[in-house]
Structures are given as C-alpha cells and as structure tokens.
C-alpha cells in the first residue's frame, strides 16, 4: 500500500539555489519536449517520443541537476498527453510558465539515494537538507516531491510503500453527514461542524492585504514584500483549513465504522458557488478524500449515496417524501403526514445514515474488501433502474 507524508524542510542557501535550478530545468525540458512533439506532429502527423537525454549534449547545464527529476518531467508530459486523448474534458498539454507554474519536482529513491538521517533528508544532487519530521514514517521511500510555495516555504511529499495490514472490523457504528455551506456538515446525531467562522476572520485580513498589494508600484521591492505577505496569509488559511479537516475526519474515522455521505455533485458545487467563497478550495472534496483513506486504513468504510437519493426530502420518521423541501432556503419543516418537526440537515443526515445501513446490509463480505465500493455502486444502479421502470 502507498501512503504520502508531507514535511517542511529548511534548505540552506546553496540548496535553495540547487532547487531553483532544478525547478527551472524541469520546466525547460518539459516545454522543450512539448514544442518538439508539436512540431513533429505538424510535420509528419505522428507522435514523437522524446526523452530528456537527447537535450543534454545541446544544453550542458541540464547535467547539473537530478536526472530523475527530468525523467519525471517526461512522465508528466506523457500523462498529460494520455489524459488529453482519453478524457474529453482534459485540454491539450500546456506550456509551463515561469511565473504561474508551481515550483516542484519529483525524484525517485534508488538504493537509498533518498533517506532520512538525524533530522536531515538526503536528496540526490542536493545533499542533506534539514527536515522537520513531525510524525514517524512507516515503509520504504519510493519517491519524493520537493515543492517551494509562493510564500517561499519548502516542503517534501514523501511517497512510501508498506505492507498492507488493514484490520478486520465488524461494521457497527454508522453516521450520516449532510454537507452544507453554512456548517460544512451536519451529522445524523445533530452535531454541526461549525466550520466557516474561523476562516471568515482571516478572510477579511487577506482581502485587506490584497488591497494593499495592488496599490504598490509594479516591480517595486515593496510590492514583492507585500506579495509575500499575501501568500503567507493565504497559506496560513489553507493550512488551518486542512488542519481542521484532518481533525474532523480523524475523529469521525476513530469513532465510527461507517460514514455515509451524499456523492459530491453539481448541486453541492453550485450551492457552494452561490453562497460565496467561504468554503472555497473544495473543502467538501478534501474532507471526502481524508475520510476515505482514514477509514480504509482502519478497516472501515465510506459509503457514498447516489445523488438521486432524495435525502433532504424524505421524512426520516414516516418515510413521506415532501417535494416542497427541494427549495434550499427551507431550513426547517414539519412533515405533512406524521407531523414530525425536522431540521433540514439533520433529517438528511439521518436518511443518509439509514440508506448506508441498508446498502451495507445488502452487500456481502462488508469488511476489509476493496470490492465493497463496487458492490454499493452496483446496488444503487440496480435500484435506480427499478425506480425508473416503476415510474413509467
Ligand atoms: Zn413524517
């Protein structure tokens, strides 16, 4: 099984120069390979396969940097091409821009060329860089991605491989989450995640910094200083948000065996867009991914309930479907059939939890199996077909 760990590193001046060179060479080679591929295609109608090695005699300085970083640039370009041909939504590979592209490169571990020793990480061509390893790491290092953030901080993402030991857990405790703009989510137990408040506080500060930044003269030292402050503030907010999402997903994965959510869909996204940017940068998506792997490592499950399932509209007491609740502005409602009082989010979360229980009960071999998700999906499409044929 693979797992990634991210740690902050503190390179010295020489090492920072080496990183800058490597980022630059990776970008340069990527763009060169792309333009050669385009030219070749225009002339012959065929796709040229290129490797960074063919440029090394012409551009001697490419030899100064980690050759595996360049090889990974080639792999990235291949992936970009593959995506372009296989997925209609993916655009044609773009050139990397010096200003806009992320400063990062990936290199691989070859017989211990990358290792952590005494608070330092050894990287090819760079040497030992000070690392703050805030948590222990299990497994064998496969590759490392070095990144410089816009606020000039440096990080490594270390990909490790380790023996999979997913425990067998009997799935007993279920919880449903209803995603919402205001609270991030509400649980079937009525707990609200209480998300955006702390973020809004910092958002104001960020807006103020952005205004200051835009007033500075272009190309001036003051403007660069201001840019760093904006980036720092932005990174601080992103980190706080990620930290918050880690804590929430950790608690859910520790305390429950199955978490049931609604499949993320356009409705959620549009809800998100309409109500502003306070839960921006795809917090729902991030939380889902965190829940998925945190539960998986514990032998537990994330169940995604198909979006056709009207979790908000069904009364969790009597099962009556109240179409009037489609209106998103309705936060509370009373069931016209049984008279139960509902909070929109809590009711939806309870329905998601119950639907999750139903799906789990009807899937064979629910513990520790990867095929589990498949089973759920299949069941749901069967049910969808049923409802479609019965409504005819
Ligand atoms: Zn009812």
Image (cartoon, rainbow, N blue to C red):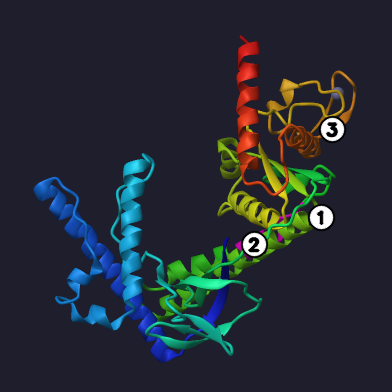
Q: SS of the residue at dot 3?
A: strand
Q: Name the residue under label 1.
A: 255
- In the picture of the structure, the residue carrying the numbered disc 2 is 241
Dominant SS type (magenta)? helix
Q: Local crowd at mark 3 within 10 Å, few (<14), some, or many (≥20)?
A: some
Residue 93 at what x, y percent from top left?
30, 53
Position of the N terminus, as image quadrant, is bottom right
Q: Residue 199 magenta-drawn? A: yes
Q: Is mark 2 on a helix, strand or loop?
A: helix
**Sequence-first tag of 2 and 3:** 2
Ligand 1 within 8 angstroms of badge 2 C-beta? no
Q: Nearest to the eye among marks 3 and 1: give it.
A: 1
Of discs 1 and 2, which sits in the foreground? 1
Residue 347 found in image quarter: top right
Q: How far apart are marks 1 and 2 (CA)?
A: 21 Å
Q: Earlier in the sequence, mark 3 or mark 1?
A: 1
- Which class describes the residues within 10 Å of circle 2: few (<14), some (14-19), or many (20+)? many
Magenta segment range?
Answer: 193-204
Q: State the residue at coordinates (15%, 49%).
A: 41
Q: Which residue in the protein does label 3 denote?
A: 342
Gap between marks 3 and 1 measured at Cα = 25 Å
Q: How crowded is mark 1: few (under 14 residues within 10 Å), some or many (20 or more)?
A: few
* Mark nearer the N terminus (1 vs 2): 2
């Amino acid at each position: 099984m693979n797992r990634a760990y991210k740690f902050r590193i503190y390179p010295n001046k020489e090492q920072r120069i080496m990183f800058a060179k490597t980022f630059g060479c990776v970008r340069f080679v990527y763009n060169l390979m792309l333009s050669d591929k385009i030219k070749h295609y225009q002339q012959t109608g065929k796709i040229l396969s290129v490797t960074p090695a063919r440029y090394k005699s012409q551009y001697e300085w490419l030899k100064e940097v980690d050759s595996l970083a360049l090889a990974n640039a080639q792999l990235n370009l291949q992936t970009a091409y593959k995506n372009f041909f296989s997925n209609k939504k993916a655009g044609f590979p773009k050139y990397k821009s010096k200003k806009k592209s992320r400063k990062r490169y990936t290199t691989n571990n070859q017989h211990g060329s990358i290792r952590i020793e005494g608070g330092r990480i050894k990287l090819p061509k760079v040497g030992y860089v000070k690392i703050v390893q805030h948590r222990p790491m299990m497994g064998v290092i496969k590759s490392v991605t070095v990144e410089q953030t816009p606020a000039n901080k440096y990080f490594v993402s270390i990909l490790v491989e380790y023996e999979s030991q997913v425990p067998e857990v009997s799935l007993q405790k279920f919880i449903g989450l209803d995603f919402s703009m205001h609270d991030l989510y509400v649980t079937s137990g009525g707990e609200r995640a209480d998300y955006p408040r702390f973020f809004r506080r910092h958002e104001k500060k960020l807006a103020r910094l952005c205004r200051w930044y835009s007033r500075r003269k272009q190309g001036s030292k003051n403007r660069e200083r201001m840019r760093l402050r904006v980036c720092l503030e932005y990174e601080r907010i992103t980190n706080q948000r990620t930290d918050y999402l880690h804590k929430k997903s950790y608690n859910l994965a520790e305390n429950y065996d199955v978490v049931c959510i609604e499949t993320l869909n356009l409705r959620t996204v549009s809800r998100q867009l309409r109500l502003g940017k306070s839960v921006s940068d795809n917090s729902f998506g991030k939380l889902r991914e965190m829940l998925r792997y945190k539960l998986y490592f514990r032998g537990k499950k994330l169940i995604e309930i198909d979006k056709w399932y009207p979790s908000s509209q069904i009364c969790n007491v009597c099962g009556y479907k109240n179409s009037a609740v489609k209106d998103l502005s309705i936060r509370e409602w009373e069931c016209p059939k049984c008279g139960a009082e509902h909070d929109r989010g809590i009711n939806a979360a309870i329905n998601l939890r119950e639907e999750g229980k139903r799906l789990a009960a009807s899937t064979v071999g629910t513990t520790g199996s990867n095929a589990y998700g498949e089973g759920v999906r299949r069941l749901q499409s069967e049910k969808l077909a049923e409802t479609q044929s019965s409504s005819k």
